[in-house]
Image (cartoon, rainbow, N blue to C red):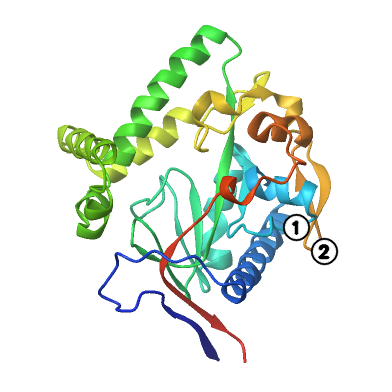
Amino acid sequence: MKRFGYFLTKNSRDLDVKVELSPLQLRNLKHYLLSIYEDVFRVCDKYGLCLMLTGGSALGAVRHKGFIPWDDDMDLLMPRKDYDKFIEVLPKELGDKYYFSAPRMNQPAHSLFLKIYRKDTVVSAWPFFKKEGAHLDIFPLEYTPNNLFLTFLKSCVCFALRTIAICSKKDELKNKNFKKTMSVNLSSLVYYKICCLIGFVFSFKSQKYWFDLYDKFVSMSKRTKYMAIPTGKHHYKGELFPVDFYLPPMKGEFEGRSVFLPNKCGDLLTNLYGDYMQIPPVDKRERHFYTEFNLGLDS
């Protein structure tokens, strides 16, 4: 076993420098993400669970038949019932190779949705500087109320709980490098101070409490006419559509593998990206930066 990767800054203590991955590093990271996906898909297939690509990964499947060339992550989607069953069997099925973070598990969550990390990797992303493994994101697909007014009310409460949960991340907010990064201009500094204030006001309960409460509130077992991805970056109503936009899933291709996509994937991608088949100019592409990147690769 040889190690691929290193601190990306000139000095491991100097975390001011943010660096993009080289083509070789990006290729190797994608190799790892695909290996994680294959392990996850194997478990889902074993238990008959629905697993779909979403977001940029779904866009990559449709436009590139694989990763978006400059992308460095994978986003997956599971209906809530399957999502909960998957989390239940994860420790038994994949616990030797991975560690996990999700609300309502036996350890504190680092995000509002499930993250699956490879144990033998270290990846520190800017601006949070946390040492995490190469990972996949899996979002729960939720039913939402049929009544539009109830949907509006629920979206408001979700926004408030989401804000509190994110601001309760004391370790991240107190990280001196993150604080320094957020002090580069007035608007980001004000945002940082507001987050700290909200975190302080609601510190009478633990971070785990707020993450668990959010997850309980957005989950809905009753079948309705609509579904959404409340934990996605577009929040509760940003990807809210009739059920048949998501289910049943359709087949697609991703890096030579057969995958599942939401039923009306084109409509969902249009909602997210507009003319999604048009490749954006370089200055409009989403960019990610790192301070440490270490993968264990077979010789």
User: Which residue is under mark 1?
Assistant: 66
Q: CA distance from mark 2 to mark 1?
A: 8 Å
Q: Residue at x 71, y 35 (%)?
A: 269
Mark in the foreground, 2 or 1: 1
Mark 2 Cα shell of 10 Å, populated few (<14), some (14-19), many (≥20)? few
Question: Circle 1 sits in a helix, a strand or a loop, which is it?
Answer: loop
Q: Is residue 100 above or below residue 195?
A: below
Q: Are marks 2 and 1 in contact (CB under 8 Å)?
A: yes
Asked which quadrant contains residue 270, the reply is top right
Residue 49 visible here: no
User: Which residue is under mark 2?
Assistant: 256
Residue type at mark 2 is Gly
Q: Position of residue 285 (x, y in %)?
A: 59, 49
Asked which quadrant contains residue 123, the reply is bottom left
Residue 91 visible here: yes
As drawn, is 205 to the left or to the right of 75? Answer: left
